[in-house]
């Protein structure tokens, strides 16, 4: 019989780090489980979906592991639900022969287990780079937040359903596009090495955004030909990479647009959200009309209903009328910081470049649409 006792809050926090990739419906039952491995004074918790694997280490204390030598697996989300609902401070486990007994306060639960040998661990690649990419967690989390919304979803061009990471010497660039808009952000790091490119899957990107902290503690990324390993705090995430050739993003970013304006981010966001109410359900198109001193935002739908918003702006360029998918504009305005954004336009048929006045490393390109 294997026995383990530890703080309920500590165990719940550790499980919260690994349970995000566990789908509620599984074709393979063991993929819904968490692998529990007691060894060397630590407790290892591992989850996997065959393409992403997350392992968390926690230290419940040497005495607690004295009678826990064998690994086991138990349903991850069910265990989390029990721990959240329990009232005691300490949780005690006993497991053997396909059953796990859990006690917390005056509550008792009996759960089915599956053998640890059946758990499908992701095979570690043999060709990991010797030089890791290191940067603060908060910096990587901020960069991911600035571009993740531009990734495609369920596109047949599978390489668009992810995020391109380019490490070239000390320069790190993240790029996401769905073919209609593109988001790009760059940063300098303390790392040095040869140029590396990798496409991170969408699920991996979303998990990293959830797990990374807003702090200066380091995160380390190591790349293999078809895999990335991300290590930070007591956690390790291993993920397959997306195969394929990412579009040449540098050719997409326009240069030399002659019409520029600064506009209040919150005011434009609110105006777009209001006119979006009357957009066509299928096309979500809005019209932007620029003239000196004024930006007019309008929409119409099939019922001939119309919404118009006017914003006073500092603008002395050409009169331009251009249409966009309103969701593409709302996405960027809702995800970037700062009071103002810069718009650069050429004419009514060319893409618009959106950037931040105080951050030259961020660029967002949106293709126009006919309305």
Image: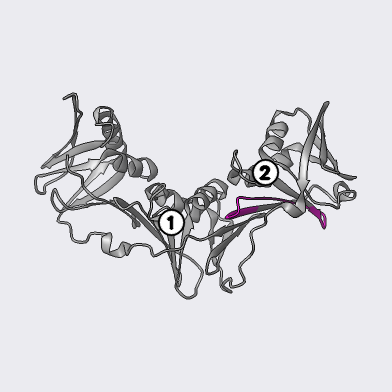
Can you identify the residue that label 2 sits on?
29
Q: Marks 1 and 2, Cα distance to the nearest angstrom?
A: 30 Å
Magenta stretch mostly in which secondary structure?
strand
Rendered position, 234 above or below 290: below
Which part of the image, by quadrant, shows the N terminus? top right
Q: Position of residue 257 (x, y in %)?
A: 17, 57
Image marks 1 and 2: residues in contact by CB distance under 8 Å:
no
| Stretch in magenta | 38-54
Q: Position of residue 338 (x, y in %)?
A: 36, 45
Could you say which disc has been placed on residue 39 in the image?
none
- Binning the other alpha carbons within 10 Å of mark 2 as few (below 14), some (14 to 19) or many (20 upward) gives few
The residue shown at (70%, 46%) is 34
Q: Quadrant of residue 7?
A: top right
Residue displayed at 33% across by 42% down: 333
**On the picture, is 104 further left or further right than 143?**
right
Q: Say left or right for 247 vs 204.
A: left
Nearest to the observer: residue 168 or residue 295 = 168
Residue 245, image x, y percentages? 39, 65
Of the 4 image quadrants, the one containing the C terminus is top left
Neighbourhood count class around disc 1 (C-alpha, 10 Å): few under 14, some 14–19, many 20 upward: many
SS label for mark 2: helix
Q: Nearer the viewer, residue 13 or 190?
A: 13
> In the image, residue 356 lies at what x, y percent?
31, 51
Which badge, 1 or 2, comes first in the chain's sequence?
Answer: 2
**Residue at left offset 61%, top offset 44%:** 27
Which residue reaches farthest front? 27
* Residue tagged 1: 163
Above or below, comparing residue 133 to residue 371 in the picture: below
Q: Is residue 41 magenta?
A: yes
Location of residue 310 with respect to 358 vertically, above or below: above
């Amino acid at each position: 019989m294997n026995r383990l006792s530890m703080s309920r809050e500590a165990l719940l926090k550790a499980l919260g780090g690994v349970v995000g990739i566990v789908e509620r419906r599984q074709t393979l039952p063991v993929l819904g489980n968490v692998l529990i491995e007691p060894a060397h004074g630590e407790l290892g918790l591992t989850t996997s979906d065959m393409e992403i694997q997350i392992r968390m280490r926690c230290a419940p204390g040497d005495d607690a592991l004295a009678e826990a030598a064998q690994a086991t697996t138990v349903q991850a989300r069910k265990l989390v639900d029990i721990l959240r609902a329990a009232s005691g401070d300490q949780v005690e486990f006993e497991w053997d022969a396909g059953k796990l007994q859990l006690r917390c306060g005056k509550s008792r639960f009996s759960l089915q287990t599956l053998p640890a040998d059946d758990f499908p661990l992701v095979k570690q690649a043999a060709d990991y780079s010797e030089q890791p990419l290191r940067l603060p967690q908060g910096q990587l989390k901020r960069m991911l937040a600035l571009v993740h919304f531009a990734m495609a979803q369920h596109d047949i061009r599978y390489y668009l359903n992810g995020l391109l990471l380019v490490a070239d010497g000390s320069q790190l660039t993240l790029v996401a596009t769905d073919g209609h808009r593109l988001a790009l952000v760059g940063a300098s790091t303390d790392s040095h090495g040869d140029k590396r490119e990798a496409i991170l899957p969408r699920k991996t990107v979303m998990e990293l955004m959830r797990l990374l902290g807003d702090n200066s503690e380091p995160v380390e990324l190591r790349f293999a030909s078809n895999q990335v390993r991300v290590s930070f705090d007591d956690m390790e995430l291993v993920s397959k990479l997306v195969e394929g050739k990412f579009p040449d993003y540098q050719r997409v970013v326009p240069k030399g647009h002659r019409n520029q304006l600064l506009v209040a981010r919150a005011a434009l966001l609110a105006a777009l959200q209001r006119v979006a109410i009357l957009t066509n359900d299928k096309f979500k198109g809005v019209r932007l009309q620029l003239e000196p001193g004024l930006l007019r935002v309008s929409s119409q739908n099939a019922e001939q209903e119309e919404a118009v918003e006017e914003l006073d702006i500092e603008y002395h360029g050409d009169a331009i009328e251009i249409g966009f998918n309103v969701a593409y504009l709302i996405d960027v305005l809702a995800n970037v910081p700062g009071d103002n954004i810069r718009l650069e336009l050429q004419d009514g048929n060319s893409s618009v470049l959106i950037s931040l006045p105080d951050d030259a490393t961020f660029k967002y390109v949106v293709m126009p649409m006919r309305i």
